[in-house]
Image: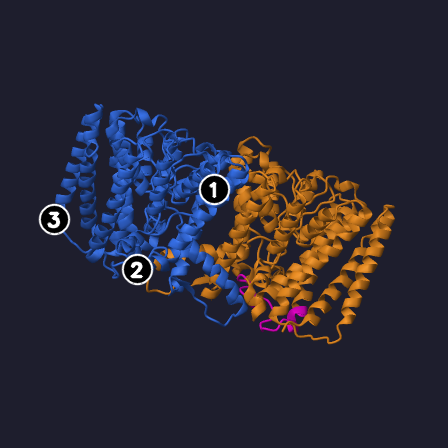
Chain colours: A blue, B orange
Amino acid sequence: MLKKNVIINFVGFLLILEGIFMWVGIPFSLYYNDNDIWVLFFTGLLTSLLGLVLFLSTKNKDKEVRKREGYIVVSIGWIVMSIFGAIPFVIHGSIPSYTDAFFETMSGFTTTGASILNDIESLPHGLLFWRSMTQWLGGMGMIVLSLAILPILGIGGMQLFVAEVPGPTKDKIHPRVRETAVRLWGIYVLLTAAEIVLLYIGGMTFFDAICHSFTTMATGGFSTKQASIAYYQSPFIHYVIIFFMISAGANFTIHYHILHGRFANVKRNEEFKFYITIIFFFAVLIAAVLFFSNYGNLEVSFRDSLFQVVSMITTTGYVTADYEVWGTFLLLLFVLFLFIGGCAGSTGGGIKIVRHLLLFKNSFLELRRLIHPRAVIPVRYNNHSVSQDIISNVLAFFLFYIFIFILGSLVMSLMGLDFMSAIGSVATSLGNVGPAVGSVGPTDNFAHIPSAGKWFLSFLMLLGRLELFTILVISSPAFWKS
Amino acid sequence: MLKKNVIINFVGFLLILEGIFMWVGIPFSLYYNDNDIWVLFFTGLLTSLLGLVLFLSTKNKDKEVRKREGYIVVSIGWIVMSIFGAIPFVIHGSIPSYTDAFFETMSGFTTTGASILNDIESLPHGLLFWRSMTQWLGGMGMIVLSLAILPILGIGGMQLFVAEVPGPTKDKIHPRVRETAVRLWGIYVLLTAAEIVLLYIGGMTFFDAICHSFTTMATGGFSTKQASIAYYQSPFIHYVIIFFMISAGANFTIHYHILHGRFANVKRNEEFKFYITIIFFFAVLIAAVLFFSNYGNLEVSFRDSLFQVVSMITTTGYVTADYEVWGTFLLLLFVLFLFIGGCAGSTGGGIKIVRHLLLFKNSFLELRRLIHPRAVIPVRYNNHSVSQDIISNVLAFFLFYIFIFILGSLVMSLMGLDFMSAIGSVATSLGNVGPAVGSVGPTDNFAHIPSAGKWFLSFLMLLGRLELFTILVISSPAFWKS
């Protein structure tokens, strides 16, 4: 039997937090004399109060969350946050349509970064701050989800790196989740603070430095500028953001090890090495193509290449240059980047590096298995044998991802999008990236997508953010029967 | 140690046959008074003589072919046939460039059907006949390959349906291969003969009826007309070809069962049922779209839809209508069709229905496995449990297919092709289909592709035709070490 109390209790708790976080941007609106102060104050207050009512309405505080509730709580969490998070934009009138506001907020909480705003700078500072905050909170949610909850649910190879970090190992979710989460959130906050300081030194206003640090560390990609990071000319700012995007796209247990001086663990981590390798491989390759096609000097070619590669692979989605004008070969590469994704246990979305690595290894081992049909040849990852169950789950994840991508593209083509825009909008939503190709390219936005399409893409963002299986399991009849 | 004798012996045998088959079209050239008689005669003679020399040069007639030789013999077979098969076109001058002639011939033997000819009707009848013959022979090769050789090599789930047909089960290839092959070739010849009669009745010349029957049954798609089957207005001809394309794309053991009245076996075959279901599902869906967009009357909408769907899914590649002008939604569907493929054990190429079916089943079972982590839930196919080894191999096949498709598209984009043409040319070559999208769409051809691109696409056709693994295994260091 489903423990409804646990779920209601959790939703109440989330809403209380959400309401409080809405207030955090109010000081900026006061400072800049904006007109969104009361909107944020009252929406925040009412959201918190509603949360409090829900929280208190559940008498039996059952602390034991099982897998079944885990699935539901995770899925409902993101939805509820987006439903309420969208309200201030609508009441203030800066995003009059609730569809648009919901799309923008879901894009925030899922750290996607796809926007429907045509004039970002016209928004008051409190709302801009809240918009960046949705991503930062989404990133926080993702850390606890991917490092503490999904591994227990057994989803998509997430068990693999849990062994590396002090964390829960039993079927019950509660005991050590909080401990792990707090530890990793500490790192998240620390890195955010460091970036704020550096961006401020680099010449951003304090407000912009905070907002961009929030959305960098969440691999979100919302900017306070319509032109995204291209607004800033400073190479220093670009490199700072590149560094923090790479950090945010890495498994947070890596940072934990680095902070504790355990560099052997970092060196042994195959996913991290592969992640760094592909980033620099593609950055150099693309820089070479740009340089030899007279794009600019070597530094500019490298910086623009590196920034765009890192932004796409980490699924951040910031833009300093328009890769759509770089020719078919590079365009194809950037479409591919939509399918890579950050490391598992990062705030990045997408398929994830570790899954690609496992699939790659398994496929090549299959050749050896064909030659030696009687030998048992397991995949090895970080010096451990990986069970066939995990490989099977990772493969199923990959196939569902492709299947949903295809189905989604067909749906978007029915909404009137052309070929490139249809596949691009779906790939970028599912991968939680932000920009794509076609009419939703790096210099465009999602305002022109029909309403039904916005709801559909919002759903894909959620599906991708929750590693597909969370939603798929809930949607399966077997889940409700058992 | 590799038995070189076996390989040389086999190549000699193939060349003797190829030379003899080159002569078969000569009577038509005599009848139509064409100028390619001596070209075919002498090329055929010299090819056969060279083959005879190779065949006789191997003293020790070792009858025992092991897996290692199996891999090499299969790969070399298709290459040698194409190298020699291209010669008559060049000597005659109708295809002056050897690159073009090799592309055309590889496209023939792999039953792809992609052509570089801009004026097919200008070719003499003997060469046109030889061109169709390459596909028919390729189809014959494929039947013995997929039903007798690949299952023993353990490639891509091919073991699965072998149990259904009297065939070899041991590690040694020789004993019952010949028996199985002869039986299934009988069916192939029978169906070809039946189609010739029906197309002749439908109004084709005897020559065109033979050529089109050859390329239908091979799911090849070479036509003797530049306009492909669109040249013929007769609905009867269209429906006859649809019927035989469907037959050619089905597992030939199905025909064997039907001929022996074992309909229970046919009804039990999940791949066949799935194959028929998706064909009619998409045919009806697309017909509806066409009809409601005022494409034509109901019969024309249905016929054009069914013909194109069957042609693409069976990987034949005939054309009676240009699907590129049917809008983005249908265009996306036709791009997808490039990745479906016929049934295993048919002459069709591509990923194959059975693999999609197994992947589909395994992915959905994964949801149940997540909910019941301790239960062992195997995939079932035709009422049997499928071993995890086979699933793993099928998954590896799928991933290699996608990986090669991506890499190939990048290569073709470097050759100057635009996005759609790059992905289309690679998908259609790898899937042995024929037409694609972009500049290699159903009303275009491959003449404009740069030379390097033609060699590369020829390689992809071979790779796809030999179910990837044959070539991949040979390319792996482990194969040569053991």
Give the chain of mark 3.
Answer: A
Please tell me which of labels 3 and 1 falls first in the chain: 3
Quarter of the image with the C terminus of chain A is: bottom left
Please tell me which of labels 2 and 3 falls first in the chain: 3
Instruction: Read off the magenta span.
Output: B156-179
Residue B149 is left or right of residue B55, and the answer is left
Q: Quadrant of residue A28?
A: top left
Give the chain of mark 1.
Answer: A
> Which residue has dot 3 on it?
A59
Q: Nearer the viewer, mark 3 or mark 1?
A: 1
Residue A86 visible to an observer of this rendering: no
Where residue A237 sits: x, y (%)?
Answer: 35, 36
Q: Nearer the viewer, mark 2 or mark 1?
A: 2
Question: Are labels 2 and 3 on one chain?
Answer: yes
Q: Residue at x 27, y 45 (%)?
A: A191
Q: Residue at x 54, y 49 (%)?
A: B407
What is the three-letter code of the residue carrying label 1?
Val
Q: Residue at x 48, y 58 (%)?
A: B395
Where residue B8 sits: x, y (%)?
Answer: 72, 68
User: Callout 1 environment at 10 Å: few (<14), some (14 to 19), or many (20+)?
Assistant: some
User: Callout 2 environment at 10 Å: few (<14), some (14 to 19), or many (20+)?
Assistant: some
> Which residue has dot 1 on it?
A335
What is the three-letter code of the residue carrying label 2?
Glu
> Which residue has dot 2 on it?
A164
Is disc 1 placed on a helix, strand or loop? Answer: helix
Cβ–Cβ below 8 Å for labels 2 and 1?
Answer: no
Is disc 3 placed on a helix, strand or loop? Answer: loop
